[in-house]
């Protein structure tokens, strides 16, 4: 089966360019192609016409590196649930379809060119606290830390986040909660993550709020997440944040009282 | 120049321990006086950067992706080996060493491989302490699975996403150092040349891929951890951006390139479906634990797989290799699949695959267990192939996956150019002519967390209180000019053919003549045709746009230009190696039953090639491999 399509693709020369949609009509698109392979075909055609190809981020093309991601007909990563753009195949479309392709739309992710955006705000959140201090060489035997299977499994599910940014792109507020909460859940669930649990939570949440909008529970992030990360992790993050703040206050109060006394 | 591998004296088991003691140290208060450049942020580069930063060195790290977390280590699925012997099934450091040497078809250095096996146990501990969510048993202990080429269960895993979880561990440790200020990160930067002064590596030339700016960076040492060159075949399981540029440009500056013909074809990938195909997707080798590989006994059998009764199926791996069966090493499994397809037994509409069937395992263990073990892989398969592997066997075929060859390094992981270190898949490393499954992650992390941090001190200590080299020197000026000239040439050629069209054509040549099976006539043809293609590239390539903003065609063009040169060297190396070993199968050299036939008398060496300038033949240097602890034998998995 092959498809004839009408594509409306966002083209923008650089961060300061206004940008506009351009229309292309690729024909004979094989239904076994991935969405990005379809864009490859369009690009080859553009090059043949001496026109600059569409810039888009992509790398592993097997749904794990998190590089790719465009908004397809208004939906981050397109119509198929739990699927990255590179793993979306053209059999999910019909011949004659009009497909609109845009970059992630969020002030936290400025457009670099065409469909390529700058997601370095995510790295900033990880820098702030998305890690466990474990200098090389200081580790004890891996089996000395017993981790019940359900805990390991849940930590894994949170850790499956690929950092693509679809959650932010899907959110009407441009919130970064799902990404931040997933990393916090991964580390805060594990015994190794306990010593820094409260400081990590505060540091990551505060950094997140510098860059991203607020969460008002639309849950669009969960629907758009190609890895099916649950918004339950956001509730967990909020609980941990609150607890961390209370602990902060308690320790401050204690010092104040002792000084007064 | 003779190659000195600098293997420490003493018994095999004591070499690394005594070497650590004998290597010079850099005291903590002196480390901040040293600048170190690391290119690449996969398992090797990321772990090295995090560790060196933590130790107090000033580290600059470069990656071409938008974030260090994207490096292709992230796509490794199956697991990581370690000689923990948690399963009490007879594993030991010596057994992991032995399996790796044998699996590599006796073409790796004993001392390096033994060190790798020793360090393997520390890696697991390190990763657990960082919070890597390895699979656990109900009692809370770490779980293991078995893998090809071994008869013990020593593979640690995190579902089918082990590479992702290990890389995120290293990435997080790296981000922690970036926050601490010990590491400076340059994402979306590509290394375009190595700068050398008096034969010593002193820095690199990079391009900021967003602004197009060309930059000079100097350091006391340069570390390349830039992965393998499998994309020379165009279609491979590598990410689209994986390239040989960093190591190739280092080669052109004098670093030796070793064993380029050792390329690994992974047996279990999804077969090609059309011309538009941009990459091939791997289905983890771990699937061979529970999946059974077969083809119909009758090559004209048109029935759906579930309609073919047991009696009409040929489980050829179980038949030919009864003791390892579906778990024979990758090269053996790949060639067996190729023979079946070449002989007309292929399955699927293009008859270009073999079945990998889970019915027996699902009947025995239940669908739940299989879903637990391989859920994400099954989903991925269903998504790509449009078929449900729970009810229908997968169709698989070998694809280019990993390259054992790379820049030559000594025991310290330093190349023949002082100050230039090479880690992970980028070096010619510890896997000989064939890498065993779950050993790439092990090597990347061993190099980055444990080997380099020790050995680099030995080199840096010689330069204490010397400032980092000036970036105004003639060497930097000249290197930058060369980079600018190449970019300019690519942008002004304005020919008729796209970069991808050249890359695809090169890929076809390499796959047809230097793929799973090679012969003299084919390799000679390939060398000639690649040369013609390379000339055509430089006169007819079309790269649009400019060099002052993000230009993905320009990025690709530079990489393909290097692949065109590497492709020739790979064929030349394959042509000179008149034997079959591991991933290098010369049709002229096989046993009567079609297995690889080594020639230990004449070829038990690593072939390190020296660049002599454009258009001139490279010079071959041999590092003889000495085997004192294993007995060289014809590999048998029967």
Image (cartoon, coloured by chain):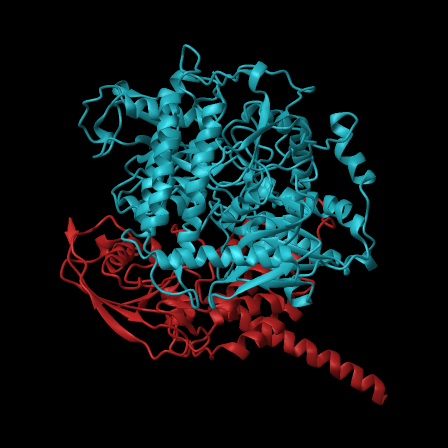
Chain colours: A red, B cyan
Q: Nearer the viewer, residue B348 or B322?
A: B348
Measuring from the top left, give residue B123's x and y in whole percent: 65, 43
Q: Within the image, what quadrant is residue A27 found in?
A: bottom left
What quarter of the picture does the N terminus of chain B occupy?
top right
**Residue that appears at 68% across and 65% down:** A196
Q: Where residue A158 sits: x, y (%)?
A: 50, 59
Q: Nearer the viewer, residue B481 or B194?
A: B481
- The residue positioned 55% from the left and 50% from the top of the image is B42
Q: How many marks?
A: 0
Residue A84 appears in the picture as rendered: no
* Residue B254 at x, y percent in the picture: 60, 41
- Quadrant for residue B429, please give it: top right
Query: In the orientation shown, which residue stands out farthest toward the bottom?
Result: A260
Describe residue B617's horizontal placement relative to residue B378 as left or right.
right
Question: Do we see residue B222 in this rendering?
Answer: yes
Indicate whether B68 appears above or below B373. below
Query: Which one is in front, A81 or B434?
Result: B434
Is residue A246 or residue B423 the one in the foreground? B423
Residue B223 spot, x, y in % from top left: 63, 49
Q: Residue furthest top?
A: B592
Q: In the displayed structure, would residue B241 be above or below residue B266?
A: below
**In the displayed structure, does residue B243 sit left or right of residue B61?**
left
* Residue at 27% from the left image edge and 64% from the top image edge: A51
């Amino acid at each position: 089966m092959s498809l004839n399509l009408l594509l409306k693709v966002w083209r923008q020369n650089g961060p300061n360019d206004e940008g506009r949609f351009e229309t292309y009509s690729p024909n004979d698109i094989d239904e076994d192609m991935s969405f990005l392979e379809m864009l490859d075909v369009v690009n080859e055609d553009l090059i043949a016409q001496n026109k600059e190809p569409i810039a888009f981020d992509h790398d592993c093309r097997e749904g794990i590196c998190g590089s790719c991601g465009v908004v397809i007909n208004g939906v981050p990563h397109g119509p198929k649930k739990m699927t990255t753009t590179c793993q979306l195949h053209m059999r999910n479309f019909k011949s004659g379809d009009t497909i609109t392709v845009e970059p992630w739309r969020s002030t936290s992710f400025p457009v670099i060119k065409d469909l390529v955006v700058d997601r370095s705000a995510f790295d900033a959140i990880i820098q702030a606290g998305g890690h466990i201090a474990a200098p090389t060489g200081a580790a004890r035997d891996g089996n000395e830390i017993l981790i019940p299977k359900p805990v390991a499994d849940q930590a894994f599910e949170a850790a499956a986040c690929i950092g693509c940014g679809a959650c932010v792109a899907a959110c009407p507020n441009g919130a970064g909660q799902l990404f931040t909460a997933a990393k916090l859940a991964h580390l805060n669930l594990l015994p190794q993550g306990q010593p820094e649990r409260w400081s990590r939570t505060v540091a990551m949440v505060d950094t997140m709020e510098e860059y991203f909008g607020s969460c008002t529970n639309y849950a669009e992030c969960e629907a758009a997440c190609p890895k099916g990360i649950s918004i339950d992790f956001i509730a967990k993050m909020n609980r941990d944040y609150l607890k961390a703040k209370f602990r902060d206050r308690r320790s401050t109060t204690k010092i104040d009282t002792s000084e007064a006394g | 120049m003779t190659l000195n591998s600098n293997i420490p004296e003493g018994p095999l088991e004591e070499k690394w321990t005594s070497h650590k003691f004998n290597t010079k140290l850099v005291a903590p208060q002196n480390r901040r006086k040293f600048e170190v450049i690391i290119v690449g942020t996969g398992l090797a580069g990321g772990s090295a950067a995090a560790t060196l930063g933590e130790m107090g060195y000033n580290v600059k790290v470069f990656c071409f992706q938008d974030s260090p977390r994207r490096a292709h280590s992230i796509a490794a699925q199956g697991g990581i080996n370690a000689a923990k012997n948690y399963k009490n099934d007879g594993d030991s450091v010596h057994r992991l060493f032995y399996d790796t040497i044998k699996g590599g078809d006796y073409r790796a250095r004993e001392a390096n491989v033994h060190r790798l096996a020793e360090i393997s146990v520390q890696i697991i501990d390190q990763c657990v302490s960082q919070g890597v969510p390895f699979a656990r048993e109900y009692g809370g202990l770490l779980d293991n699975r078995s893998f090809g080429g071994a008869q013990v269960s020593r593979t640690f895993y995190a579902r089918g996403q082990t590479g992702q979880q290990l890389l995120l561990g290293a990435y997080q440790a790296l981000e922690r150092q970036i926050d601490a200020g010990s590491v400076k990160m340059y994402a979306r930067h590509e290394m375009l040349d190595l700068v050398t002064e008096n034969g010593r590596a002193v820095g690199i030339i990079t391009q900021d891929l967003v602004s197009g700016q060309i930059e000079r960076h100097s350091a006391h040492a340069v570390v390349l951890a830039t992965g393998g060159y499998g994309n020379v075949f165009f279609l491979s399981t590598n990410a689209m951006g994986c390239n040989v540029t960093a190591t190739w440009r280092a080669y052109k500056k004098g670093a030796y390139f070793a064993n380029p013909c050792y390329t690994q074809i992974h047996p279990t990938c999804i077969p090609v479906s059309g011309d538009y195909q941009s990459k091939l997707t791997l289905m983890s080798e771990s699937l061979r634990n529970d999946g059974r590989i077969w083809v119909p006994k009758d090559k004209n059998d048109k029935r759906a797989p579930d309609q073919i009764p047991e009696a009409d199926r040929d489980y050829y791996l179980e038949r030919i290799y009864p003791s390892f069966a579906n778990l024979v090493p990758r090269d053996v499994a790949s060639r067996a699949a190729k023979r079946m397809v070449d002989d007309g037994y292929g399955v699927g509409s293009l008859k270009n695959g073999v079945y990998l069937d889970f019915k027996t395992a699902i009947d025995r263990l239940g669908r739940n267990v299989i879903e637990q073990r391989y859920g994400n892989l099954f989903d991925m398969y269903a998504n790509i192939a449009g078929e449900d592997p729970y009810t229908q066997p997968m169709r698989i075929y070998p694809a280019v996956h990993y390259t054992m060859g790379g820049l030559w390094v000594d025991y310290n992981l330093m190349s023949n150019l002082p100050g230039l270190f090479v880690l992970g898949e980028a070096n010619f490393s510890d896997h000989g002519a064939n890498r065993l499954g779950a050993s790439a992650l092990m090597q990347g992390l061993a190099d980055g967390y444990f080997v380099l941090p020790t050995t680099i001190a030995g080199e840096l200590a010689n330069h204490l209180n010397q400032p980092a080299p000036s970036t105004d020197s003639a060497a930097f000026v000249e290197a930058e000019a060369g980079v600018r000239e190449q970019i300019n040439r690519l942008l002004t050629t304005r020919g008729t053919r796209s970069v991808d069209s050249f890359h695809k054509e090169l890929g076809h040549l390499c796959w047809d003549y230097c793929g799973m099976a090679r012969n003299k006539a084919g390799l000679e043809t390939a060398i000639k045709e690649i040369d013609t293609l390379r000339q055509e590239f430089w006169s007819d390539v079309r790269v649009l746009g400019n060099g002052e903003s993000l230009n993905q065609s320009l990025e690709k063009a530079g990489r393909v230009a290097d692949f065109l040169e590497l492709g020739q060297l790979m064929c030349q190396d394959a042509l000179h190696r008149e034997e079959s070993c591991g991933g290098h199968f010369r049709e002229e050299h096989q046993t009567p039953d079609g297995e690889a036939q080594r020639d230990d008398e004449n070829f038990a060496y690593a072939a390190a090639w020296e660049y002599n300038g454009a258009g001139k033949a490279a010079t071959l240097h041999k590092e003889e491999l000495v085997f004192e602890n294993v007995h060289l034998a014809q590999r048998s998995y029967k």
